[in-house]
Image (spheres, rainbow, N blue to C red):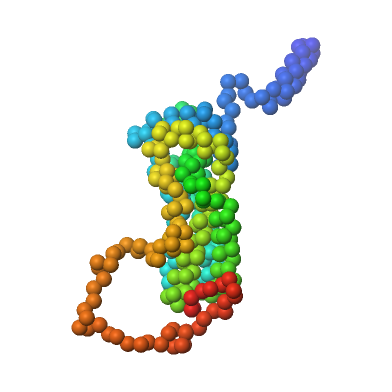
């Protein structure tokens, strides 16, 4: 009896040692779960692209599922906002960052059953799917840029403009600005959007640009327009970049009405003479009256 118990403990110890040795390898027959998410600066392989296309082909409309816009629109601040301009800029930057958040975007897919079934077949998480889709989408967008659109230069100019905006109007509540000054601030705040787009697109490796160009016909109709058209042209300063004297604001001159019998003609004093104040400007800081 003692001998049997001794043999039992010896075998138990041996099994325990073997189990500890094999533990790092995982249980036999159990699949390893890889949850690493693709980043914009990582190369996309032909195999990964084939997997993405296979998933999209299995969906009812064979396109990327509808998601919130990744490329955030330019800032639109209500004139009644009482936050200082520098806080509004910081708030805008945080909102833009959220648009690129894999976790935030993946939450919008949790109820997409056809997609979730396809992801299970491919052993992919919603976050991995979003990460791969963003990487391919950013590569598509990057491939639409023109040679004269220098991302580094755009980012540099944008940072200069935003820093000047913070210095000139930073502590002023947005609601305290004149109509002209608030328009100027919003016009300059668009650089927050341009900087983000330039910085994100600059991460795309040249290899990704090549691979999406090779598969453009397979990819373009599956991705939303924000990824298949030039993303910098959408936020361009028409006056500065193209020399246009004004920006189209949604209506034409045909809608402007006036009656020569009732029109008032006079000689009003300029705003700065009538009591408006003008911010102190340096050689490089030319701003409208506040």
Camera sees residue 174? yes
State how many labels appear: 0
Quadrant including the N terminus: top right
**Which residue is pictured at 32% across the width and 87% down the height?**
266
**Which residue is pictured at 47% across the width and 36% down the height?**
213
Against 214, residue 254 (above or below) is below
Side of 249 where 230 appears, left or right: right
Residue 272: % across, % down: 47, 84
Residue 252: % across, % down: 28, 64
**Which residue is pictured at 50% across the width and 57% down the height?**
193
Q: Give the quarter of the image for residue 118.
A: top left
Which of 27 and 59 lies nearest the eye of the viewer? 59
**Which residue is pictured at 47% across the width and 32% down the height?**
214
Residue 5: % across, % down: 76, 15
Residue 13: % across, % down: 76, 20
Against 152, residue 55 (above or below) is above
Which of 135 and 80 lies nearest the eye of the viewer? 135
Camera sees residue 5? no
Side of 152 where 250 appears, left or right: left
């Amino acid at each position: 009896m003692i001998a049997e118990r001794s043999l039992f403990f010896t075998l138990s110890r041996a099994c325990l040692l073997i189990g500890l040795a094999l533990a790092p390898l995982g249980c036999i027959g159990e699949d390893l779960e890889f949850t690493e998410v693709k980043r914009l600066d990582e190369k996309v392989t032909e195999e990964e692209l084939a997997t993405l296309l296979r998933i999209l082909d299995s969906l009812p409309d064979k396109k990327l599922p509808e998601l919130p816009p990744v490329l955030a629109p330019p800032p639109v601040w209500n004139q009644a906002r009482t936050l200082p301009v520098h806080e509004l800029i910081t708030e805008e930057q945080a909102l833009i960052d959220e648009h690129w958040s894999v976790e935030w975007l993946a939450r919008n897919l949790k109820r997409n059953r056809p997609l979730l079934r396809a992801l299970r077949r491919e052993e992919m998480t919603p976050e991995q799917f979003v990460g791969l889709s963003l990487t391919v989408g950013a590569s598509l967008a990057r491939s639409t840029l023109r040679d004269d659109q220098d991302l580094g230069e755009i980012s540099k100019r944008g940072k200069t403009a935003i820093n000047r905006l913070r210095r000139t109007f930073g502590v002023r509540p947005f609601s305290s600005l004149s109509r002209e000054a608030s328009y100027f601030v919003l016009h300059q705040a668009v650089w927050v959007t341009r900087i983000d787009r330039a910085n994100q697109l600059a991460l795309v490796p040249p290899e990704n640009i090549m691979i999406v160009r090779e598969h453009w016909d397979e990819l373009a109709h599956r991705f939303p327009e924000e990824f298949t058209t030039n993303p910098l042209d959408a936020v361009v300063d028409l006056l500065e970049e193209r020399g246009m004297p004004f920006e189209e604001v949604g209506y034409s001159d045909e809608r402007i009405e006036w009656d020569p019998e009732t029109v008032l003609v006079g000689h009003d004093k300029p705003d700065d003479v009538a009591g408006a104040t003008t911010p102190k400007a340096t050689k490089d800081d030319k701003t409208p009256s506040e």
